[in-house]
């Protein structure tokens, strides 16, 4: 039985991971569950999967403790998440959103735990650090992000000399057919209308501006040890092809399936084997229209910002990630418009000088500096003028 820890068990990826585990309960033992604020769901999950321990924000600890009293399950607050992530298991699923996911993933790797990674932001904000540490501790990082899972399934680094391009597909997000003025002034309810995927708020908003695809370009560079110029993005509205590699011999290899995260989650859990995920295989007789388009960089400047920041290096992806996180948070609160998100990120990239962080302390310094400067910048924005 594989022992599994889930960081972010109450989120979209976390709950789907537990669904896949429930369908294959003879193969997996849930060791630890980590949540943020959803105490009711964490309690329900703990009673069902009986982990050794759970962790939740201190605000909810009394409620969780009283509901799990007598079960033998240890209940911790957020200060113990790194400790939980460090406990030796077969696989840690990294599914906390944003840079909050970095420290537990970092500590899990340091303990030699293999990682199933959904939390792309930890690679974006600290990819050099994470990949070095993973190499040092001989830890496998198995992607959950559907595009990277697709590449992971059809390509290995041993084929690098024959690689022409990695091609990441993108549904296009909520604004694919909207004009630039609509996008600039769009509000939260517009950005949350993702055409194909049901996901957490942050990744859905990132998808609407192709920021998510840009973050995925950076993620691909780290995971597959390639340069930005080796990664193309193509809009594929149907989300049936999850990504592709083109090889020098003229072959293009794609991984396909219905847009359901349970497929890449199942693969990450069972790698290198295959298990039941609950997702049907494709019915090709139903598919007579797979389309491919170039992304519009004028409408979606975030994609180019991500590419530029990865090419520049020197801590720029850390700045991009931190300023984007804060901008998305402000957008959710209604304090800024959609178009402000990429403007804010662009400004922060141009004003903050940095170098690549080598450890968590250097990362925190650059991250916190960016958050402080982004907050100041957000205050100066007049929402009516955007
Ligand atoms: N959803 C998808 O289909 C999808 C696809 C590809 C990649 N991803 C990536 O996977 C990650 C998770 O996405 P998601 O859609 O599952 O997000 P989500 O639904 O918002 O879930 C986030 C999870 O992280 C927990 N969390 C947030 N902040 C935390 C903190 N400071 N400490 C502890 N736990 C914390 C949340 O807990 P509470 O809910 O209890 O507060 C929740 O369990 C993201 O990096 C995203 O980009 C997601």
Image (tube, rainbow, N blue to C red):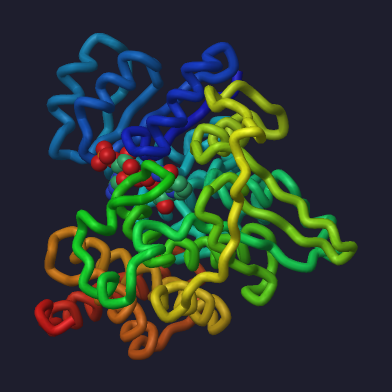
Between 284 and 76, the one lying in front of the other is 284
* Residue ID at (17%, 77%): 378
The quarter of the displayed image where residue 58 is located:
top left
In this view, 22 is above or below 88: above
Residue 327 lies left or right of residue 259; in this view the side is left
Between 279 and 130, the one lying in front of the other is 279
* Residue ID at (63%, 68%): 232
The quarter of the displayed image where residue 347 is located:
bottom left
Which quadrant of the figure contains the N terminus? top right
Q: Is residue 29 visible?
A: yes
In this view, 154 is above or below 166: above
Residue 379 lies, in percent from the top left, at: 12, 79
Which quadrant of the figure contains the C terminus? bottom left
In this view, 171 is above or below 215: above
Residue 321 lies left or right of residue 249; in this view the side is left
> Ligand 1 shows up in which quadrant of the image?
top left
């Amino acid at each position: 039985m594989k022992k599994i820890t889930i960081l972010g068990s109450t989120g979209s990826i976390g709950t789907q991971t537990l669904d896949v585990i429930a369908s294959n309960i003879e193969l997996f033992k849930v060791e630890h569950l980590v949540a943020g604020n959803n105490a009711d769901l964490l309690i329900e999950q703990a009673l069902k999967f009986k982990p050794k321990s759970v962790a939740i924000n201190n605000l909810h600890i009394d409620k969780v403790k009283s509901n799990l009293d007598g079960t033998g399950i240890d209940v911790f607050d957020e200060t113990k998440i790194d400790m939980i992530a460090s406990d030796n298991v077969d696989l840690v699923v990294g599914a906390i959103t944003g840079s909050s996911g970095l420290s537990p993933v970092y500590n899990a790797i340091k303990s030699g735990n293999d990682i199933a990674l959904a939390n792309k932001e930890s690679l974006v904000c600290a990819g050099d650090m994470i990949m070095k540490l993973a190499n040092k501790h001989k830890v496998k990082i198995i992607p959950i992000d559907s595009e990277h899972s697709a590449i992971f399934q059809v390509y290995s680094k041993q084929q690098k000399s024959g690689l022409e391009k990695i091609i990441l597909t993108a549904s296009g997000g909520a604004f694919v057919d909207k004009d630039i003025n609509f996008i600039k002034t769009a509000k939260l309810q517009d950005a949350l209308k993702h055409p194909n995927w049901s996901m957490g708020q942050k990744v859905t908003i990132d998808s609407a501006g192709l920021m998510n695809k840009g973050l995925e370009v950076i993620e691909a560079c780290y995971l597959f040890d390639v340069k930005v110029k080796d990664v193309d993005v193509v809009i594929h509205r149907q989300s049936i092809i999850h990504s592709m590699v083109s090889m020098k011999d003229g072959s293009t290899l794609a991984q396909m399936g219905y847009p359901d995260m349970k497929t890449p989650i199942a693969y990450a859990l069972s790698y290198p084997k295959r298990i039941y995920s609950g997702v049907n295989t494709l019915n090709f007789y139903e598919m007579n229209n797979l389309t491919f388009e170039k992304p519009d960089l004028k409408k979606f400047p975030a994609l180019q910002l991500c590419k530029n920041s990865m090419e520049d290096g020197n801590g720029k992806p850390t700045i991009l990630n931190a300023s984007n996180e804060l901008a998305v948070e402000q957008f959710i609160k209604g304090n800024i418009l959609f178009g402000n998100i990429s403007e804010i990120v662009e400004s922060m990239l141009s004003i903050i000088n940095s170098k690549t962080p080598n450890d968590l302390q250097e990362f925190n310094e650059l991250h916190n500096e960016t958050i402080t400067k982004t907050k100041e910048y957000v205050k100066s924005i007049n929402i009516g003028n955007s």
